[in-house]
Image (cartoon, rainbow, N blue to C red):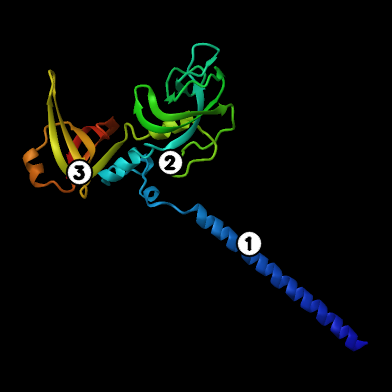
Amino acid sequence: MKQLFYYFVLAITIIAVSSCNNSSTDSEKSESNNNETNDEQIVISPEEKARITPSDIDINTPIPVTQLYNSFFEWKDKEVVIAGYVKMYLDSDDLKESVEIIGSPDSYDVLFSCNFAEASGQTINKDDIVIIKGKIQEKSYWGIKMVDCEFVGVNEEVSDETNPNPYRLPKKPVLAENLYEVYTWWEDVEVTVIGYYNSTTTSILSDNTIWRIDLADPETGDKKVGCNMKTEPDNDYLKDNRNDVKIRGIIKEESFGRVSMEECEMVD
C-alpha cells in the first residue's frame, strides 16, 4: 500500500513539473514573439534615421544642407490619403475635376488642391468629410498641390495622428489640417546650415540689392539651400574657402527647387 502511494505521489510530481516546463516554454515563446513584433516595429530606414524636425534644431549646431533639404522636401511625391472639406459656395454640389480642400466647412484657407482625371459626379455636402488619395507635388498659392488624385469616399473614420510621418503613414486617412501643419512646419524656423559654397547671385532692384548665396552638397555639388544675405558677402574670400561655409537665417518656402532662407548672415 505504501509502495502504491509512493508511485501516486511520484506521478503527480512528474505531471506538475511537466506542466511548469510547458508553461515556461509557452511564456518564452510568447516573449520571443513579442520581441520579434517589437523589433519589426522599430525598424527604421536610413532616410528616416537622418530625418530632422524643427524640434531637433539647435541654432548653434550647423545642419548639413542636404539633411535640411531632405527633411524639408520629405513629402514630395509621397502618396497620401487625406480627409477634409471641399471648399464650396452652396450647401451641396457635385465633385468637380478640380477641388480645394479646407480644414472646416466655414474656412476660406485652402490647404490642398487636387485635380482628378475626370469629374466623379459624386454629390458632396458642405459638411461632408471627403476622403481623397493623391501624390503630393508642391506647395503653391492654392495650398499643397496634389496630382493623380482619386476620390475614395465620404465621412469615413480618420486617423488621430497629429504629426504624421511620411515614412510610416497611418492606415486611416490623415486630417488635411494635420498634414498641412507638418508639411509647412519648417517655415519661419531659424537655423544654421553648413555646406559647399557654390555661387553668389546679385539682383539689383530699383530700391535695393539682393545677394543670394547658394550652398551645395559637398559630394554631388547639387544646390540645396539658397540664402538671401543681409549684407553683401565677401565673394573673393568665399571663392578661396568654399568648404564648410556656415550661414544662419530664417527658412521660408521653396525657391528654384531649393530651400529658401531670408535675413542670412555668415557664421564663423
- Packing grade of label 3 (10 A; few <14, some 14-19, many >=20) is many
Residue 246, numbered circle: 3
The answer to which quarter of the image holds residue 26 is bottom right
Q: Nearer the viewer, residue 34 or 136?
A: 136
Quarter of the image where the N terminus is located? bottom right
Amino acid at dot 3: Lys
Q: Residue at x 58, y 63 (%)?
A: 32
Q: Which residue is mark 1?
A: 30
Q: Which residue is mark 2?
A: 166
Q: Residue at x 47, y 44 (%)?
A: 168
Lower sequence index among marks 1 and 2: 1
Quarter of the image where the C terminus is located? top left
Amino acid at dot 2: Pro
**Residue 197 percent location from the top left of the image:** 16, 43
Tag 3 secondary structure: strand
Left/right of residue 267 with respect to residue 166 in the rendered view: left
- Packing grade of label 2 (10 A; few <14, some 14-19, many >=20) is some
Left/right of residue 190 with respect to residue 114 in the rendered view: left
Q: Nearer the viewer, residue 64 or 248?
A: 64
C-alpha span from label 3 to label 2: 29 Å
Left/right of residue 154 with respect to residue 165 in the rendered view: right
**Residue found at the far top of this picture:** 90
Q: Nearer the viewer, mark 3 or mark 1?
A: 1
